[in-house]
Each structure stands twice: as C-alpha cells, then as structure tokens.
Image: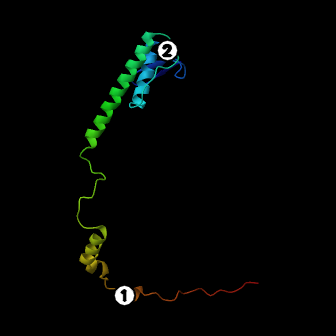
Amino acid sequence: MAETLPEITIFGNPKSAPSSAADWWATGFIDGYNAPDDPHELPALVLNSEMAACYFIGVLDGIKAVQAANAAVDSAIKNQPGIRPDIGGISLKEAEREYNERFERLFHEHQPHIELEEYRVTDPVLPTMGLVK
C-alpha cells in the first residue's frame, strides 16, 4: 500500500509496528512532539541498541520541533490583543451611562409623521357577493 502526499510517499501499513530505523525515528518524533514534557521510555518492541538510538534521536527531534513551533506561534501573537489584566479606566456601566447621556437627543428624537390625504387607509371596497343555486 502506498499513499502519496504532496511532500512524501508513505509505504506500508501505518498501523503496523515499527520495523526499520526510520520507523523508530518517526515513532520517537511523534512521541516527542506530542508529549515534550513527559519522560520517554523505550518501547518494549525495540530489538537492538541501534533502533533504540533512532527512537531517542526521534524523541529529541520531536521535542525540538514542538519547541520551535511554539516559539514561532508565541512570537507571532505576542503583540496581538488579548485578555490581559485590567488596565484601569472607567467601568462598563459608567461608559454606557455616558454614552446614553451624550446620544440621548439622537435616540429619542422622533421624525415628524406626514400623512397625505391620498395615502390614508380607507375601508376596502368589496364586491357584492351572492349565492347561486
């Protein structure tokens, strides 16, 4: 089975146990990326020290990758607005009261009603109806 993605081609069954050095590195990378602060133990399936080294190199690379990604996100949103401690100023109720006082004249001024004689509502003219036998 082969699945072609835009950057890489993956051969094999993704649900199978790691068997090569690249598989163990990828497993370690995933573990390191998903849990960078957790202690990582060697899985029981590792057959030799070369595969164990590949796993731990993958863990370290995954930790470095997640730290770099987090640093990039943090630097991108550092100066963005967000929820921060109160910086002072007037309360929301005070601001609403001032707003309503300043714009009360605009909000409560009614437009004059103009009714023209020709547009007044009159009783509708109904046709005469009768029953036919």
State the residue at coordinates (26%, 76%): 103
Residue 7 visible here: no
Query: In which quadrant of the rendered view does residue 60 lie?
Result: top left
Q: How far apart are marks 1 and 2 (CA)?
A: 93 Å
Query: In which quadrant of the rendered view does residue 128 lie?
Result: bottom right
Instruction: Count residues near mark 1 (Cα–Cα under 10 Å), then give few for <14, some for 14-19, many for 20+.
Output: few
- The total of numbered circles placed on residues is 2
Of all residues, the one furthest to the right in this rendering is: 133
Question: Does 30 sit above or below residue 82?
Answer: above
Percent across and percent down for residue 122 are: 48, 89
Left or right of residue 112, residue 18 in this image: right
Residue at numbered disc 1: 116
Circle 1 or circle 2, nearest the eye? 2
Percent across and percent down for residue 16 are: 55, 19
Residue at numbered disc 2: 46
Quadrant, the C terminus: bottom right
Percent across and percent down for residue 28 are: 43, 22
State the residue at coordinates (68%, 87%): 130
Between 14 and 45, which is closer to the camera in this rendering? 45
Left or right of residue 16, residue 71 in this image: left
Marks 1 and 2, the one that precedes in the sequence: 2
Between 114 and 66, which is closer to the camera in this rendering? 66
Amino acid beneath label 2: Val
Residue 58 visible here: yes
Percent across and percent down for residue 97 are: 28, 75
Amino acid beneath label 1: Leu
